[in-house]
Image: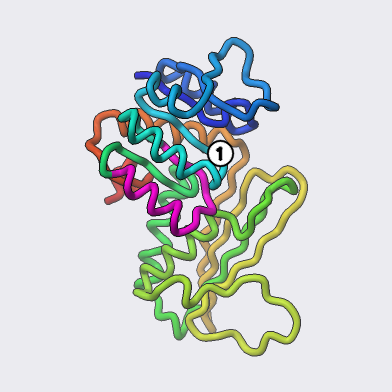
Amino acid sequence: MRIGIAGIGGRMGRVLAEEAARAATLVGGIDREDVATPEGTARFPGIAALGEAADVVIDFTHASTVTEHARALAAAGCGWVLGTTGLDAAQETAVDVAAHRIGIVQAANFSPGVALVLALAERIAATLPAEGYDAEIVEMHHRQKVDAPSGTALALGRAVARGRGVAFDTVMESGRHGHTGARATGAIGFAALRGGQVVGEHTLLFAGASEHIALTHRAFDRRVFAEGAVRAALWLATQPAGRYGMEDVLGLR
């Protein structure tokens, strides 16, 4: 199996390249002109050329590239493992359109542990009434991270909303500051911490009057995300066109 890496010169891209080379054939990758690629790896002129050379492209780049990558990979018939977060509605639509022609595994976090936490979050939320258990999500990442809340934190919030049968956008509450008034019943709260070189820490808390239930995941090495993404790429090679998640890769649904 041939795997290509979008963003191969970045911190995550280099780890992805190492893991892909262990499990399959690494054909090379793409990156910005000002970013050096790992020594000994082929550099392609663009996403279209990479899609033609690979069976699956693993992509942890930036939301601004998603629409172009969706079109190019669909045209090439190349599978897509997409870990880019922060997509807007138009970019999500581009992914949907591409999924009619190619297999896509999309996840905010490719850690198997996070996939299990998301499944548990939805189940707990469906069991514990929102009127009695307040849901709060706290996440911490390295100081260079540019978006908040993190994609994984948002995925946790959406899992809680699904479990409760409500629209996530109507209950999300982030960035409290000043005199905010009492907490709204059913709200899903977020707090984002940034500092040092924390790879990723997430805690989902269900706070009741008489008990608290906490689900916590801590990542200590980016390699766990790379291992999960390569696992998804290998799984995707045998799947028909469609849009999948890590829960599909792990057989959780």
Q: Which residues are magenta?
A: 81-99
Residue in the picture at 67% in, 22% down: 36
Number of other residues with Cα within 10 Å of mark 1, as a class: few under 14, some 14 to 19, many 20 or more: many
Q: In this view of the protein, can residue 110 be seen by the observer?
A: no
Front-most of residues 107 and 199 = 107
Q: Which residue is mark 1?
A: 61
Q: Position of residue 63 (x, y in %)?
A: 54, 47
Q: Is residue 42 above or below residue 188?
A: above
Residue sitting at 40 percent across and 26 percent down? 51
How many numbered circles are shown?
1
Say which quarter of the image contains residue 159.
bottom left
Q: Is residue 60 magenta?
A: no
Q: Secondary structure at mark 1?
A: loop
Judging depth in this view, the residue of 253 and 16 nearest the camera is: 16
The type of colouring in the image is rainbow
Where is residue 137 shown, x and y percent of the image? Answer: 57, 65
Residue type pointed to by label 1: Thr
Task: Name the residue nearer the viewer: 157 or 57.
Answer: 57
Above or below: residue 214 compared with residue 220: below
For residue 37, side relative to residue 119 (left or right): right
Q: Is residue 184 left or right of residue 119?
A: right
Residue 10 vertical placement versus 135 (above, below):
above
